[in-house]
Every structure is written in structure tokens, then in C-alpha cells.
Image (cartoon, coloured by chain):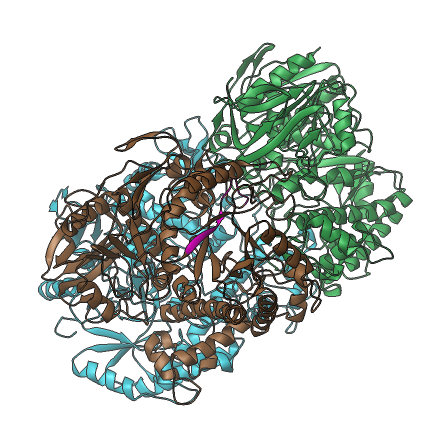
Chain colours: A brown, B cyan, C green
Amino acid sequence: MAALGLTWVRIGEFAWGRLEPTPGDLHFGWLDEAIAVLGAAGLRVVLGTPTATPPRWMLTRHPDMLAVDDQGRLRGFGSRRHYCFSHAGYLEECRRITTLLAQRYGANPHVAAWQTDNEYGCHDTVISYSEAARAAFRGWLRMAYPGNGNDGDIGALNAAWGNVFWSMDYADFDEIDLPNLTVTEPNPAHVLAFRRFSSDQVVAFNRAQVDIIRQHSAAPVSHNYMGRVTDFDHFDLGADLDIATWDSYPLGFLEDRVGATPEQQRHFARQGDPDFQAFHHDLYRAVGAAQGAHGAGRGRWWVMEQQPGPVNWAPHNPAPLPGMVRLWTWEAFAHGAEAVCYFRWRQAPFAQEQMHTGMLRPDGAEAQAFHEAAMVAAELADAPDVAQRQARVGLIFDYGAEWMWQIQPHGAGLCYFDLVLQHYRALRRLGLSVDILPPSVRDFAGYGLVLAPGLMVVPDDLKAALSASGAQVLIGPRTAARDGEFRMPVPLPPAWNGLDVTVSRLQSLRADMPVPLAGGGAVTGWLEELEGGAEVVLRTASGDAVAMRAGKVTYMGGWGDGEALRLLLSELCALAGIAVQELPEGVRIRDTGTERFWFNHNPHPVDTPVGALPVAGVLRVPV
Amino acid sequence: MAALGLTWVRIGEFAWGRLEPTPGDLHFGWLDEAIAVLGAAGLRVVLGTPTATPPRWMLTRHPDMLAVDDQGRLRGFGSRRHYCFSHAGYLEECRRITTLLAQRYGANPHVAAWQTDNEYGCHDTVISYSEAARAAFRGWLRMAYPGNGNDGDIGALNAAWGNVFWSMDYADFDEIDLPNLTVTEPNPAHVLAFRRFSSDQVVAFNRAQVDIIRQHSAAPVSHNYMGRVTDFDHFDLGADLDIATWDSYPLGFLEDRVGATPEQQRHFARQGDPDFQAFHHDLYRAVGAAQGAHGAGRGRWWVMEQQPGPVNWAPHNPAPLPGMVRLWTWEAFAHGAEAVCYFRWRQAPFAQEQMHTGMLRPDGAEAQAFHEAAMVAAELADAPDVAQRQARVGLIFDYGAEWMWQIQPHGAGLCYFDLVLQHYRALRRLGLSVDILPPSVRDFAGYGLVLAPGLMVVPDDLKAALSASGAQVLIGPRTAARDGEFRMPVPLPPAWNGLDVTVSRLQSLRADMPVPLAGGGAVTGWLEELEGGAEVVLRTASGDAVAMRAGKVTYMGGWGDGEALRLLLSELCALAGIAVQELPEGVRIRDTGTERFWFNHNPHPVDTPVGALPVAGVLRVPV
Amino acid sequence: MAALGLTWVRIGEFAWGRLEPTPGDLHFGWLDEAIAVLGAAGLRVVLGTPTATPPRWMLTRHPDMLAVDDQGRLRGFGSRRHYCFSHAGYLEECRRITTLLAQRYGANPHVAAWQTDNEYGCHDTVISYSEAARAAFRGWLRMAYPGNGNDGDIGALNAAWGNVFWSMDYADFDEIDLPNLTVTEPNPAHVLAFRRFSSDQVVAFNRAQVDIIRQHSAAPVSHNYMGRVTDFDHFDLGADLDIATWDSYPLGFLEDRVGATPEQQRHFARQGDPDFQAFHHDLYRAVGAAQGAHGAGRGRWWVMEQQPGPVNWAPHNPAPLPGMVRLWTWEAFAHGAEAVCYFRWRQAPFAQEQMHTGMLRPDGAEAQAFHEAAMVAAELADAPDVAQRQARVGLIFDYGAEWMWQIQPHGAGLCYFDLVLQHYRALRRLGLSVDILPPSVRDFAGYGLVLAPGLMVVPDDLKAALSASGAQVLIGPRTAARDGEFRMPVPLPPAWNGLDVTVSRLQSLRADMPVPLAGGGAVTGWLEELEGGAEVVLRTASGDAVAMRAGKVTYMGGWGDGEALRLLLSELCALAGIAVQELPEGVRIRDTGTERFWFNHNPHPVDTPVGALPVAGVLRVPV
């Protein structure tokens, strides 16, 4: 590892069974030795708490610790992540093992960082319909709707949720069940509360470990997130941590969660989507920032698991084109990664991930990623460091909005994540670098353009901050469409000071019914009817207002397709004085403090203004 | 409301939680006031019993009142219709609240009609696999197969069902379970009995309320049905009522249950299917007739909920074209509706239906339906009343046949409702008005043509009545194919006196394998082989008999496509002396006693023999 | 029956309810009489044990006898096969009824063969997640990983399965659950053990009956298998029996399990797939052979149920073209069937199979199969017997490999059965007759070409036997890819002595991404990267090795399409000195000891070198 040029090694994250084969029978010797060996070789260790894989005896001790799915089925032992975040007994066990690890290795000089658990939320594990979750949810609601004393104000909850509708009023918090298996759809306010609760449970679970580690260690604490897992609020969780890391599997993601068309899946099958990883890099840079420091591009983040070759878990598992592992690595550094680690070192010849390639084959021979990582290590040694800088464009991403769209898509397949990703993609095709911003940001200094599409809840102070920011602001569709209790505000949305626009009605449309716009492009899937005195800046081909503007705030009352977004964002960039450069398909750029990086994601070479880009080509152009 | 021209207001149907917030704590004051206010304004009230939404405390009182789905999962509290029709305790609670309401408002002059519950069967709520249902089913079977004493004759049941097959004989009624979760398909006779039982439970549940209301009130009693809900026999239930009302959501239905092709869904996306609503108007006119009065077009029926704009519940929720709310309203009147009400008055900004538009927006501003309803109100005031008359064509619709086709479709996707709707559509494209007839009708006076496609069970007296009716009669495919116990009769079907036709064999075919007919059109999906001495009137292109005739009875041994039905029905109309007029796509007519109504369901204007029809155009032409 | 020319009649297989209507109340009289009547007419009886349909009282006696599906739902009474193979109480009941039957009829001269149960595995009934199965699985594992004493060696199991991964180690066999409802995928070694156990339970269940019958009867014992049921090892089960019989439903299978394209489903809708039945004939000929005698084409086998017309259970149920019942019958004889029986004699007008045609209609009239069976009977009387001979090509089929591919397909839709069937189909399109071989075969004398595609586990002695066989041997893709515990071997696969080929990496590909080969054809879905010094005999169009050869062993590192297999197999046949004859689509031949049979499966006549073949045509050409 050291000879190859690696500097970090993560270990221990699934090792509970080896650390404590039977309850209380602790075996730290092998881990002591492993850390010592790695440290002696000059490698720094990230030590994981092993709480993602409770051993079998844990289930005997806590038979009710399992999560329950939305169909009421126990989610059993035999793989991983088989615990409910609301189970107090398991939480206590996690505190115990974390304490033991932190006490033993907190001052170990080779343990240079910590990781809590692994991939919270992977395999749909945030949401549990267990008895433990139900009891905890009731307690959470009592706190969310406080009354006199400890019992909460059930009347406040009924009023907030609109439970008068369909005679759904509760007389007591103990009457409230989890919102699954209802006859028809449950109250969206009920579901939203449950989604917020579920997210908070993950945050609390994580915080318990962080608090313990910090008592014993000065090393930074991280968690390793997944791609497109949105069931808990990563900003909330990240606020307790020093570093955000994530797992970048470009080919698996393209098959499994990008939402690409079959044509795109074929074209990018061996390279991955050109924006999906970059979006997460930018997202986790924001998650990695301490609260309040968002927007300046200063968050600490890593790629903890970089795809090294074919994986085992996607519907199809092609091999990356030669050079793509290197390209992905450089792309991460260009977006500000502090480190890029590869998963895994050696392919395991047994168990669930036996088809997941590594840097070494099961027989120890070197595989694709080994050679490409070595090339990157050499290049890193020869080149200047990547200097980060704030982007000119900010794009707000809100986990809560994602939940609300999931609860009430209104049109089949409409999804907040896709809406934001499509805006991100359109910006990138214009050659722009983007900062993802949390919904808590209020300081927009430095941004020429800020986007908040689909941000269902916009507090008044955020509205005010955006209006006062000096940036061009693009909102809609569905921005500010609800209050925090999932109610439609009156006056009707967006109810934005200084912007005389009202969404008077809205409709969802079949995907095969695009509504053409007067200047090109179309609206698909979602179309609002707008009223008010603001200037109409975009119309349907038949003349209806689609976007309206007052000052620097533009409201877009529909879901624009790629061409519509290209036109609209180009205009907004012109107004903001931001230069754009339209890029060929599959080519992307990233601006750092001193350079412009060019990446070719196509399976063929491409000519660019700065020269030819070969397959898997990366160019660093000083600016 | 009154100023707009409304005359009826329905209230109370989901108000149990407000009427009785905790058990026995009754709050009628607000309802007294509401009725008084409405009445003082000159509005008439339809008062609903609130039994579709039992409050949360009801579940505490009756923990086993919930329905169970076919996978064995409880269908919980948190939306509506969370009760099993077989639960005796809940039935008693419904009697109690109905009695309280009937006593208090039975003589109220403003309460001019009653509604029991709401939308029985919506959200698949007729069929329940609960313990209560199982016990009730056993009791129902004991009555259906009576023996000496109270215990039923289990041998009679075994013989009727053919339980000797696969050793399925029962020794006692208490051994009989509900027909879900069997290893492979259950006995169709078993399922049919369960479907009939389930329907009867709804009828009995409803009758309990009707009996109470009639003791205290002279006002007519109605129930509000849904579109394409066929899990209970509406004719049976309607026999206890004075008025049938239903909920007409043309755009939601097109997305969700018409069975249209994607092309049709695009073409009619903002107008709705041109036949689906009309079919239900005609169906509920029959349901609204007292038993025995069917066929004369005299049933009392309303539209209780007319779609006013985009709704919340379909896969996509487009906005109606301007004028369509008016068109739908006039179409209902042309088919004989006594009243058309709009749902809802004001859009609720909270809870499940917050995206369901109303006549008013959440902020109280007037929406599309407000203006179009006002237009209709003015037109009604200016024009003569619509006079109904019996149609020349009768089409039998049987809920029991629908269940039998569902139990044994024999070919994927084959469905009785679709078969009947396609016959109805073909008749309408020929410019014909149609009466839907229940299977209990025996008097066909006035009809020149009667159709009974797919009517699986035809009692001998119905066969005789049809043969003697003097009308041209079209039967098949699958008409008279089974006896009442889901057995194939021997002699083989249709076994129709005077018609020497035998279905010697039948097959189902992939949808992409149409069998062309000699004279045009094709048979798709279902094809029978016919034997016998009757005249062959239709053949496949390769010469096999498809339809045969003796006297005025024609047997069609296949599922004809649109062109085949056009040709066959045109010929039958010619034989019957019924004039036809082929209509352009999307144009439909309806003949009343004094007028011919023309409706344009297309998104473009159309030329017709009586002049140009604009988008959403309605013409009344005196005849 | 006798007049028609039938010689065998099977009875009794679902008759438990009539034999023992209540526990212990035995009624053999009707069966005595039936056998006597049949025997007196000169018919021979196959008597079935009735254990596939336990009566309702059995469930009262053994409430926990039901199987449980993978979602945890009980699989209830009301159809058939409602038992868990692991339930000791039900097994004992089966021993009891089998003993009673064997004692009574074991010496009956008309009972000329026995059948145990019926269609093991039909309706997915092999695998059960019941408590009984869990307890039995633990016991099976204790035997599979024996320790000192009776408790098994849990450490050996942990090591073999690689349970160190994700902390899945067990401390005791009683901690091991069944591998369903885990959070994400279970350990493939865990699932494989469960699949093997499940298969063994069927074998043990069957053996219990066979042992009893053999104590009382000298008549041969058979079981009646289904088509494409692979959940238990038919070779293992067949080793206890004398005759293998199976149920050939060509039209139902084409709709339901062949895996044909829509185009193929249309083309062959009324004739059935041209290879699927033949494959099963050849497979069951191997299953019918005593262990050790495989490969010589000497196994005893029948068609117990030949489709006689439209059936009731497929998604669509078309009618066979005239002559196809005769063709199917002759095809079975050409492949060596001892008997072909038709199911059923008379169509039952009630219960689940009322739409399953028979030789007689429900009214007793003669149906298609009656006439075609009569024709075959006459032809059989007039013609020489069919003499079997060993084929020149052997194709290994392994149920265990099927399970392993199902557990780990790696690419969506990839399936071992399809891989083998596509090789079989390619061989047949070259005019070849094929012997299916079990994985236990070691003697390949007489074969010029042996294929073992996808055979995941290849023991060393099988590798050696193949290499030493003198035949051309085609292996890969994925042959020898795992050891018996589902681990990847090191050195990497195929690790074949004398063949310097290593699969260095592999990938799965979307079906719409075929990789063209240099000489024609393509690889689809699965592609391996090959290393080593063996000769490259096939390359991709871009030059990568796809197939490599040393001596007579060829390794194919991809899933070849039809054209690729045609080219590769043609070359191998040339090397082996096996003459091929490319056949038109839908035409197949079968070589026996003395004749070449020609069959036309097309819906149109075809010209062949031996003359015109009409629709449904069969030719016997002496050789």
C-alpha cells in the first residue's frame, strides 16, 4: 500500500464479530497489531466503529432490535444494518463498544481519523415501522407539540395537521400510529412528521458515538455517506462531524439510481454519468462544512470508497474504460476532496461482495485500480495542490423538500432530487462550477446566481435573504409552496415580498405531453398557472405565462426541459455577469482557485477549445 | 353559493369526529347551525351519515374492526374507510350514530335528502379477509346451502363447488376459510361465493342505515357511488334507495381506470374519455330505478361530485380545457341527472386532498368550476327542462359477470367491464343512445336491440324473455357460459332454445395476434369455435364461423375489435330498424325526449351535420 | 379408451379425500372397482399416491404443516400442494396412506406402475420458510458440518461460508435462520446451503414412499415431473425411481416459461417452442436412468401428461394447430419415450381446471386429442419400434448450477437454464441429436463433443475425466467459477489442468449492448477477460480474447448469441468429425438407431432435403 502511494487506510467498520465474538469477550489484539503494522509503514488509519454489523448474539440479547419494513415485516439478521435506530438497548450497546474503542485508540498516533458506523440509510434502513420506532415517534411528537407539563398538546397537533379532515383527530399522543398500511394515503403532515423524526433518530444515534469519541480523541470524526441516500438530513448529521466522506460508484449508480434513459445508460455505461458524482462531491463539500460556513466551498470531504472496477450490486456491472478510475479520482480532487480511497484493497473470494473488484484480485494480482491509483499518486507528487474557491453559482438542496415531494409528488415520477440534479446538469453544460448550499444558509455573498427550485418550505428570513442578496435568484416550480406543517399558505404561494406572482392553479402532465415554450424548449410534467403584476419573461407557445420576474427574483412556474433550462440559465447568467461556455455532451469543466480542469466522460475522444481530450482524458489548464 | 345558482349542498359525510369527539360526547350544535344557515339561504341540504370515517376512539373500542387485505395485513387508521363490513360491533355503532342523526334531523325542513356513508368500495374496501369476515362468510354459506336445522348442508356445498377435485371436500362449514393465500388458484366456485357474500355484506350494512332513516324522515335516501367500482352489486344496493348519485372525475378516470391507450390518454387528457362518464350516467340511471322499473330510463340519479379542475389522486392531474366543466355538467343533464353538484366548494389547504381543486381556491378566489357552473345555472334558467325517454338499445350489465371474469379471465387482461364498455362505445360511435339494463330485467318492451355480451350466467327465464322480446338480441362471447355455481353447463353453452349453436372449444390469444374477419375488423383476445345448424353470419378470413344467428338471436363467438363491432352492430340496427349516424372521433350525441344533444370531446373544433362544434362545445337541437 | 388404442391409465393421484374422507375412515371400494374395470378392458393402471392433496382434516390434525413463503405468509388450504416437505407429522401421514395403498394394490395384476405424489415443486412448493423447515435446516447443517458428537462444527461452517464478512459468525447452529427477509442480500453460501437442503428434503420425502411401495410391489415406481421446475435435483430424486415421467404442455410453456421473444411467441403460438419439449425429453431420459447409466440414452421415461388442446393456466391459452398433438406425441417417441399419456380423459366442468381441455369434451364428445391420439395409435401399430441410440453430443445440466446462478446472477436476467437451453437450441439448429448428462457422469465414451457451459462447480475428477475423454470439450462462461461453498477459487477459475487460461475479470452488460465478435455473432450480457498462454480462438471485434483452447478443451469467456454459438459449435463439430446440417427455422430432426425423424414446428409448410414437410408434418426417414 505504501509503495503504491496510498496514505490512508480505513479499517474496523464491520469488525464487531471479531472484536467481541461473544458478549463481553473482547479481542483487541489483532486490531492493535493491524494498526501498528499500518502505522509502521507510514500509513494513517481511519478507524470505524463497527455498529453497522451487530453480531448474531446481539439479536439474542435484544430480540426487538430489528427494524420493520412498511409492510410490517421484520428485517432480519444475515446481512448488515439490521437494527432500528430507535431501539434504546442497541443504542446503549453502540455506546459501549464505541467507548471501548475510543478509550483504547483515542490517543493512538496512527489513528488519525474516526468513522462512525457506515453508510447510514443504505438498503433503506432509515425508516422503521417497529414498536420501538412507534414509541419514540410519540415521544418526539410530544416534544414537537409541547403543552403544559410533559404530555404535549394534542390539540396543537390536530390543528397543525388538519386532522379535522376525515375525522382523523387524536385525543392523545398514544393514539398516533406510524403512517404505513393505511387504507388510502395517510395525511401528508403525518408522514412528514414521521420522516423528520426518522431523520432525527439517525442524527441522535450518530451523535451518541461522536460525543464519546471526542472525549477520548482529538482526531477528526467522519461518517461515510452513500450516493443518493436522502432519507436523513445529511446537513443535520454533518453538523456534528469534522469530515464528510462518501462512496462514489459511477457505474453502479448509472445503472441503479441516476435516472438516466436507456440511451444514456448505453453511452455512459463504462464511464458513468458526467454529473452525478460531481453533484455529490459538491453536496458533500457542503455537508462537510461546519454549520454557518456553508457556501464558501470550505467543507472538508473525502471519497472514502472509489469504484475500482466492476462491482457486484447493480443490475448490470460493466468494467470501466481504461483511465476512468484515474479520471474519477482527479475529478474528486478538482472538486476539493482531501483524500480519495479505493474500495476495496483486495477482492474477497467469499460472502456477499465476492464479485466486487478491488485494487488486487482475489489471487493478489494487481487490478485496474491499482495501476490507475499509482498513476494518480505520481501525478499528485509532481503537480501543485488543488486550490479551492467559491463558485459564482449556488444551488440550494434541502432534504426536507425531497421528503415532501416524495410524500406528494402530485405527478407520477416527479421527484425533487431529479429537479435539482437537472438544474445542476444544465449549469454544468454551460461550463459552470456550482456550490451546493444547505437551506440554512442566509449569507449569499459572492454568488451571482442562486437557485432554489422545488424548495417547498422557504422561511421568511430565507426569502428576505435571497431577495437582498444581490444575486439573480431563480425559484420555482413549487418553491415556497407549503408551510412547515405541509399546509398550503394563504395568501397563495410563493407569497414573496416584492414579487407579485401567485400560483393560481397547477397541474401535472404525462411525460409524453411536453408543453412547448415560445422561445424554445418545453415544460414537462409540471405546469403552474401564474397571476400577478410581475414581468412575464417566459411564455408557452400559446401565450400563457410560465416565468415571471421582479427585480432579480425570477419565478419559474414549470419543470423546464434541458433546452428550456439552458435558455433560462443563460439569460440569468448574462444578467448576473457570469460567463458561460456551452460544452459538448459528456465534457465537463471544474474551476478551482488556479486552474480549469477538463474531463471527457465520453467513450470517444473530443475536441475542445483547449485541445483534444482523449478517452478518459483529464486536462489541467492554469487560469 | 345561492348567488351562484347552487340549490343543493351536501354536508356531514366525514364529520363523525366533530359530532362525537369522544365516545358519547355529542356535539350537534355546529351542524344545527350549518343547516340553519344553508336553509335560510334557500339551499337544500343532503345530510350524510359519517360512517366512512370512524374516529380514532372507535378503533380503541373495537380493535378488530379493521379490514384485512388479501396478503393478511390489517388496513389501519389514518385515512378513511378503515372498517370491515362484517364487523358486528362497528355495524352497531353505525346504527347508533345514524339513529341520532335521523332523530335530530329527520323532520328538519332543510334536510331534503340523505346520503348513507360515502363511496362504498372506494380504495378496494369491499373485500376483507378479517376474522369477522371469515365467521360471517361461514354463516352466509350455511344460509346459501341450507340443510335440516341451522347447520347448512355441507354435502350440498361440496357437490355444488366440485370439491371432489383435488380432495377439497369439507366436513363442516367451520372448515371453510377465505380464498386468499392458497398455494395456487382457489376453486372459482369458492371465490365466487366469497364475492357474492362480500357484496351482500355491503348491502346489509347500507340497509341498516336506510331502515333507521326511513323511520324518522320522509326525505329520499341516496348513496354516493364511485366510477368503475364493481366489487358490490349496485343494483342490489340501489333497490333499498331512492336516488343513485355518483362521482364523475373525467380526467382522473382517464388516467386511472378507463383503460385507454397512451394515444387516447394524450388526446383526451384535458377533456376525459368521451364514453366513460356517459356509461356511468346510464348505469346509475338504472341503479337509481326502483327494482322492476328498469329499462324505462326513469331512475333517479345525480352527479354528487363533479370534477371542478385538477384533482389530487390520479397518476397525472391535468387541468380541464376551458368549458369542459360546463360540458360535463350538460352531459349529465342530457342523460337525465336531477342534479349536478361540484366537489368541493373550497379547496382545503391541508390534509390529504389539499391538491383537489374546488369552486373556490384556498384563498377564496373563484376557480374554473365557479364560472362554468354559473354559466350552466344561467342556461338552465333560460332553457326548457330535459325530458327523458327510453332508448331503442338496451345493454345488460351484471356485477356478477364482472366477478366471474375477474376470477377466471382465461386470457391475461380480459375483463367484462371492458367488453361491455367497448360495446357501449361502438353503439355511441353509431350515434345511438343506450339504456343500461340490470340482469334482473325481463320486460324488454320498447327496445329494438338488446345486447348481453359476456353475461356468464343467464337464467332460463332471461333466455326466454330475450328470445320473446321482439328485439334483435346480441349475445356472446361467453354469454351463458356457466351456471350459478361456476360450472360449465352440459349440454354445452350457450344452450339457448331455438338457437342451434354450441361453443365446442375456446381459446384466448395474445393481444398482438388479431384474427381478421372476412368482412373487415378482427377478433382479438378471445375466440370460440362454434358448431350447430344456425346460420353463420360472420366468419374469420380463413372461413371459420365466428357469429351465428337464428331468428333475432345472434351469437358472437369472439371479442370483436372496434371495426368488427361497428359492422355487426350496424347490421343489427338495420335489421331492427334503428337509424344510425356514424360520428367523428370524440363527438357524441344524446337523444332526449325533445332534443338531440351534441358534445365535442376533442381538443379541437369539429364540423358536424348540425354545424360547427367548438372546443368543449355543446349543442341542443330540437327533434 | 381401449378402443381408441390407449394402453395405460393413471388414477388416484389426488384422491385422498375420497379414499379417507375423515381420518381413519377408509373407502377403497370405488378404487378396487375402478382398477378392476380398467384391467378387465385390458388397460394397465399407474396408481398414484395421493399425497399432493392432503384433505382438509389433515390441516386440523397438523395445523403447522403448511409451507411458508419467502414473505412469511402461510400457504393455505384450498388448492393443492399445501404442505411443507420438512413437516414430520405430514411425512408420517404420507407413509401411512402409502402403506395402505401398497399393501392393498401391491400385488394387483392391473397395477403395472406406481407414481409418487405429483409434480413436486409445481407452484413453487419446494422452498418453505416454515418453523419446521428452519429446525430441519439446522439439523441438516449439523450433518453437513460434522463435529465431534452430534452438534456439528459451527466454526467449520463459519469458515466455509466466510461469515467473518459483515460479522455474520454464528456461535451455534441454533442461531441460524432461513435466508429470507434479510436487510440486503444474504450470504450466497447461506442461500446455497438452504437450496441444497430444500432439494434434499424433497428427495427424502419421496424416498419414504418408494421404500414402502417396494416392500409390497414389484411394479416400477415413477414420479411425474413438470417442465422447467428446477428447485430440486431431479437426478438425485430419480436415482430412487425406475421411470421418469413428465408433463408436456408446449403452448402453455411457450407463454409461461420458455423465455421466448414476443415475435417467437406469435410465430409458435399454436405449435410450441421447437426445442423446449425436446430438451425436457432428453433431460428426463437422463433422469430416468439409474445412476451410473447416464449418457447412454437408456433411461426409462414417459410423457405422463400431453397437452390435448387449450389449457387453463397460461397467460393466454390458444388452440394447437391441427396435427400438433400428433406431432408432439411422435416427437416424444422419437426421443425415446416408452409411453405418451394425455391429460385429461374428459374435461371436468367444475373446479380449477374446468378450462383444461381433454380428449373428450365435458359433454363426452370427442375433442382434437382424441382423433390425433387415435391416428398415432394406428401408426404405432403399423410401424417398426423406435430404436434408441447414444447421441454424439453430450450436454451437462446441473441443478446446483441453476441455483448458484439464481443466487448470484450478477447481471439482471442471466440464468443458467437459459444458457444451457440456448446451447441445446444451437446444437439442434445444426441438426444434431443431444444427450443431456448429469454432473455425476465421468464416462464420456462415445461422445465426440461434450459441453458444460455455466457449470459453476466442477470437481477435479470431472475436469480430469473431461480432459481425458477424447471428446472436444466446450466450457465457459462461468464453468468452474466456484468451489462447493460458493467461494471463488484461488488460483482463479477455471484452474483447469493443461489449459492455461485465467478469468482475470468479468462484467455483465445490458442486453442492448452486444459486443460484436471478429468472425460474426456477438457476446451479450456476460463477458470475461481472459489471460494465459492458451491459443485464442475467438476475439471481439476490437481484438480481446473471448475463447481460448488447449488440446481439445475450449474455454468460452462470454455468453454467445445464436450466431456466435452456431459458428463455434460448427467448428467444434468439424474438429470432432460430427456432421452437421443447418436446419430452417422451426424444423428439427432427431436421429434414432435406425431412422431420422423430421418435424415441422412452423405454421406453414417447409421444403427440406427429404421432401416437403406440411404444417405439423412428421417424417420418418430410414438411415
Residue A109: x, y in percent? 56, 60
Q: Quadrant of the C terminus of chain A?
A: top left
Q: Is residue A303 rendered magenta in the image?
A: yes
Q: Residue C518 vs residue A392: left or right?
A: right
Taking depth in this image into account, of A18 and A530 the one nearest to the observer is A18
**Depicted B474 relative to depicted C279: above or below:** below
Residues B151 and C116: in front is C116
User: In front: B338, or C324?
Assistant: C324
Query: Residue B447, position in %: x, y?
Result: 31, 51
Q: Is residue B136 visible?
A: yes
Residue B397, horizontal then vertical, whole percent: 39, 54
The reply, left or right, for residue A252 in relation to residue C69 is left
A545 part of magenta stretch: no
Q: Quadrant of residue B215?
A: bottom left
Up-down relation of residue B423 to residue C8 (above or below): below
Region in magenta: A301-312
Residue C414 drawn above or below residue B392: above
Q: Is residue C134 left or right of residue A35?
A: right
Q: Is residue C363 visible?
A: no
Q: State the count of labels.
A: 0
Image quarter (top left, top right, bottom left or bottom right) of the N terminus of chain A: top right
Location of residue B36 in the rendering, given as x and y in whole percent from the top left corner: 22, 85
